[in-house]
Structures are given as structure tokens and as C-alpha cells.
Amino acid sequence: MGVHRETEVKRCRHLFSEAQVREGSAVVLPQHKIVDVLETMLELVPSSIKAEVKAFCRPGVSFDSFVKLADRTRRLGTQILRRNAGFKESEVQRFRKLFDAADREQCGYVDTYDIQGLMISLGIQVRTRQEQQAMMGRLDEAREAARAAGAEEVSEDGSGSFAFWELVQLFRMLRSDSDKATDELVDRTSRELRFTAAELEQFRKIFLKWARIEASGPMGASASLEGALDSPERSPARRRRLDGAPMSPAASGEVVEDGLSMETLDRLLRTMGMKLTLKQKSRLQEQAAAFETTAEGLLSFVGFLRMMRWLIDSDFGGINDIAADAAQRNRGNVVATSSSFISQQSSAQLLA
């Protein structure tokens, strides 16, 4: 028995022992705990395995049967993850809805001229002709990846149409490229703005939390701020892009890049203790519109970094004194830079 296999069996034994019960003279893993234990062990438990457990594993399974079930689950899960190009089942289901909507003839294939629209719906921006050509040039690569992953329906190389699993593989390729490019842009911007690695990480945490509040809508934002908002700001009609235009709801299944609207940015600053006049709010919106935005007109993470540097350098709304007061109240450590002050103290307030 190999060392890896021995380790797997030991882990099975440990998890089985923690949840086992006695049924008559036998020791079993009870049916209602089988899936939970499998999910603790494995990255993916396919729905077919869950259905099998529900239908055939009453009142439970012995240790030997559980090991065999875990082996089958691992093999099937690995196949599905490979076919899914690493995406979760829920993500693949969302992709399927978008693909089916584009497949107007319900034939299982979509014309290649629909690819750009699908990619935009999935959050991949294809802005230039060069980007379009590069994307089309990767279709055959996506077809080959889909075949290698075991997809049954794959279009011919060079054809004018493509099937669903090719879309999944192409999206993985393009998103990997996009993520890499975004990471490089964030790193360059952070160095340009003189933020340390620790400050960058703090600002990233703040941005992602408030982007989730943004995505959850007015009620989610209200709940997260424990009712601190006045009622007019809870209205969806009040949410605006950075250019002042009203927000448009995302299409069903559309993947939207994380970003902050003017309302969310204003609430974020008020949570730090800033009280802005109407004139200051107008200036804030004007400045935010000059920074990088998402396709939906929201402040992107790179734009957020530029906003924080501008707030600090201009001491907008007395932000530096507010952060220093917060540090003194919390008996925070004295740090060398204003940006460290802001990132550390605002992080304590905004992530609470």
C-alpha cells in the first residue's frame, strides 16, 4: 500500500470513527452524516453521489463500504472538476443559463459571433479588435481542452460554432489571463501610490467587504450597517454610478466585477467618522469619476486605491485627523505613514 493511499484510509478511519453509531451488532456511518463526511474529505461531492446516498444507504454504511464510496466520489468529482475547468457546479449552472439563452435554436451550439456577448455577460471585457482576435484565436485551444476533459459534445476545429463545454474552457482561459493582468495592474498601482504590502492587503479586505455590501443591495447594506442609514438611501433608485447615472440591474446570471457605487463609498467614509457637506460630496463624486471604474461604472479596486491615496494626500474631510483620533481612542500603535494610519484604523472600523 502506497504512503498516499495509507494516509487516505487513515483519514477515512478517523472521520468515520468520529461520526459512527451502532446499528444492532454493526458499526456504521449513519446515512444523514455520509455526505457531510464526504464533503469534509473531498473538494466536490457530485449530486449523483448525494442521490445515491439518499436512495440506497439506509440506515448507514460500514467502514469498508464507506471507503469504496469515498473512492468513487473522488474519481467522479475529479472528472467533473476537470470538465468544469475548476469552476463550482453553481457557477457552471449559471454559465449554462447564459449559453442556453444564446442558443436560440436549442441545438446545443452557438455561433461564434455570439461569443463576445457571452464573455461580457460573464465579466470578461473584450474592448479592442486585437482582444477580439486573440479570443477567437483561442477557440481551438478551448475545444482541445474540452475534449481532454471528457466533454462529449465538442465542435470541429475551425468551425463557426461552439458547444457549451468549449465556452467553459474558453472562459477559464480568459479569466485566468484577466486575473493575471488585474493582479499585475494592482501591484503596479500599489507601488506607484507608495502603499506597502500590508496596507494593500488591508485596503483589499475593506474593498471586498464593501463590494459585497454593494452586491447585496440596499437591504444588505442596511443590515451590515446596523440601521445607520436613513431611509431615502435604502431606495434602489438612489444607487448611482460614479458619473451620477442611475444603476442598471444586472441581467440574470451575469457576472459583475466588484465595485463601489457613490452611495456605498459615501457610507464607507461616514462609517469611518467623516461628515461631508454637499459641496464635499460633489467634489468626491467628481474625483471618483476620474479614477478607474468597472464596466458598470462603479469604482474598481484600482480606483479605490487611487481614491484612498487622494483622500490621504489631500486630507479630504480631515480624514488624517479622524484616523489619528481613532488610533488614540483604540490605543493603536504609532505607525510611520498616514496611509498606514488610514489602512489600520479604517480597517478596524470598516471590517468590524
Image (tube, helix red, strand yellow):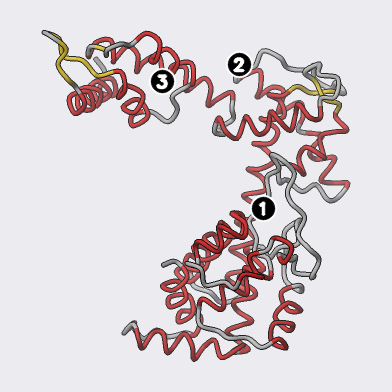
Residue 149 image position (x, y, % from top left): 60, 20
The crowd level at tag 3 (other Cα within 10 Å; few <14, some 14-19, many 20+) is some
Foreground pick, 309 / 285: 285
The earlier-in-sequence mark between 3 and 2 is 3
* SS type, badge 2: loop
Query: Any mark on residue 74, and which?
Result: 3
**Cβ atoms at labels 1 and 2 below 8 Å apart:** no
Which image quadrant is residue 98 in? Answer: top right
Which image quadrant is residue 49 in? Answer: top left
Residue 324 image position (x, y, % from top left): 44, 88
Quadrant location, the N terminus: top left
**Cβ atoms at labels 3 and 1 below 8 Å apart:** no
Foreground pick, 319 / 277: 277
The amino acid at mark 2 is Gly
Q: Residue furthest left?
A: 25
Look at discs 3 and 2 and give the one toward the viewer: 3
Where is mark 1, residue-wise?
A: 257
Where is mark 2, residue-wise?
A: 150
| Residue at mark 3 to residue at mark 1: CA–CA distance | 32 Å
Residue 42 image position (x, y, % from top left): 38, 28
Query: Any mark on residue 51, and which?
Result: none
Look at discs 3 and 1 and give the one toward the viewer: 1
